[in-house]
Amino acid sequence: MAIKLYMDVHIPFAITAGLRLRGVDVLTAQEDNTTTLSDPKLLDRATALGRSLFTEDSDLLVEANRRQRSGKRFAGVIYIHQEQMIVGQCVDDLELMAKTYDPATMENVVEFLPLK
């Protein structure tokens, strides 16, 4: 079973568009009207929708780590440092993850891009 992705507000739309062209289920914070939510609430929203959150926001790494330590469930975070964000590589890596990872595999996990 494939994972669904939730794109944080600062992710370039070209990544979302590229993923959609490849058949990946993607929802953006803009489309979901959650652009002003705090990091914990954004992660809660993505989790409630059963979507792994893709972000370049290092504060979400802190939040994910806090949840891992406390045992609070989340649907996964995929992180890339802003300086490493190359649109084509992100699309390739996220497509691979979306089509091969299982939602249960991503639960309470932080994955880092680029995949190498």
Image (cartoon, rainbow, N blue to C red):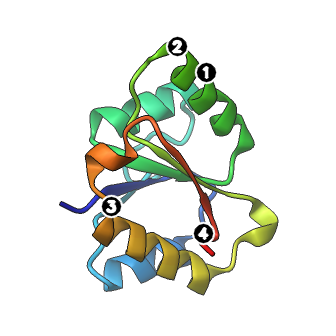
Asked whether the residues under the numbered discs 1 and 2 touch, taking CB atoms below 8 Å apart as contact, a structural biologist would say yes
Identify the mark at residue 115; answer none if there is no mark. none
Image: 1 above or below 84: above
Decide: few, some or many residues near mark 2? Use Cα within 10 Å; few <14, some 14-19, many ≥20. Answer: few
Secondary element at image label 1: helix
| Between 78 and 101, the one nearer to me in the picture | 101
The mark nearer the N terminus, 1 or 3, is: 1
Reading the image, the residue beneath label 4 is 12
Reading the image, the residue beneath label 1 is 66
The mark nearer the N terminus, 4 or 3, is: 4
Q: Can residue 25 be seen in this snapshot? A: yes
The mark nearer the N terminus, 2 or 3, is: 2
Identify the mark at residue 101; answer none if there is no mark. 3
Residue at 76% across / 70% down in the picture? 84
* Percent of width and height locating residue 49: 27, 40
Disc 1 to disc 3, how far (Cα)?
23 Å
Image: 61 above or below 3: above
